[in-house]
Amino acid sequence: MRVPFIKMHGLGNDFVVLDARDRDVPMMTNRLAAALADRKTGIGCDQLILLEPSDRADVRMRIFNADGSEVEACGNATRAIGLLLGKPAAIETLGGMLATNPVDAGVAVDMGEPRFDWDSIPLAYPLDTLAMPVGWDGLESPGAVNVGNPHVVFFVPDTAATALEQLGPLIEHDPLFPARINVNVATIVSRDEIRLRVWERGVGETRACGTGACATAVAAMRRGLVDRGTVTVRLPGGPLQIAWGADNRITMTGPATESFRGTFDPADYDA
Ligand SMILES: N[C@@H](CCC[C@H](N)C(=O)O)C(=O)O
């Protein structure tokens, strides 16, 4: 049997989407997800997205990183699935219930409320997540935020000058972060603009990370580095608008793109 897939991306953060809402797809394992995500021997993507029926929402979205790990949230993929659904929709994820809405600029997503308690990041021990007294080779005093998934945010003078390829994996796997962590390095451009690079847990550096943009905007607002309200977060793949409202909810707005559709034979993946 050949299995249909849809290749999509949000600002260059790319996905293979399998739709199991009304057809059979192979049982997803961490090994199969990693094999499909492999850019040399599989279809290739940053995240494998599996859509399943939900009795609480329009769809249930499961998210697997390129290393095969199943995770709670993916902002860019949420916009992509919002585009696919083509109407206001509720999406059930491991990180919580999300709401998508098609708009002129692409798709707006209600990403829910950020969490700052040390044990909901999670951290291995209590620290003030506004600015944690820790550092790795010049990257110091990060904030930590959970926006469905865990993020650490460093504010640096110049994101381009940060050795993210060396420090990203080191910080991702540091024992301070028992669930590993997504690593954001951000430069404040103005009171409403931030430049951002993200080392994603289970993937590496990506062209864009929606949850990273949300976590960074909130961490910067919390520290008073930008104005509370709406900011533009510029990633290597392009900009996202992030708003943190008086109701404590985060809204992310930006584009999503369908690239192509294809099929694969599960027999080619002995995973
Ligand atoms: N690309 C995503 C985040 C995907 C999950 C992340 N790597 C994790 O492990 O939590 C986004 O756009 O948010």
Image (cartoon, grey):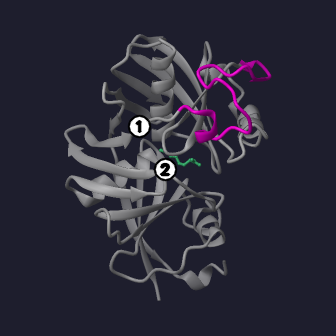
Q: Label 2 to label 1, Cα distance in Å?
A: 13 Å
Q: Residues within 10 Å of mark 1 (few under 14, many from 20)?
A: some
**Can residue 208 be seen in this snapshot?**
no
Q: Of the residues shown, which amino acid type is indicated by label 1? A: Glu
| Residue with the mark numbered 2 | 73
Residue 11 image point, x, y percent: 42, 41
Residue 19 lies in quadrant: bottom left
Residue drawn at (52%, 53%), measured in percent from left and top?
72
- Secondary-structure class at tag 1: loop
Region of the chain picked out in magenta, as a range: 116-139
- Main SS, magenta region, reads loop
**On screen, 190 above or below 212?**
above
Q: Residue at x 43, y 26 (%)?
A: 233
Q: Which residue is mark 1?
A: 113
Neighbours of disc 2 within 10 Å: few (<14), some (14-19), many (20+): many
* Amino acid type of the residue tagged 2 in the rendering: Ala
Residue 195 is marked as: none
Vertical placement of residue 122 versus 197, above or below? below
Position in image of residue 198 (x %, y %): 58, 35
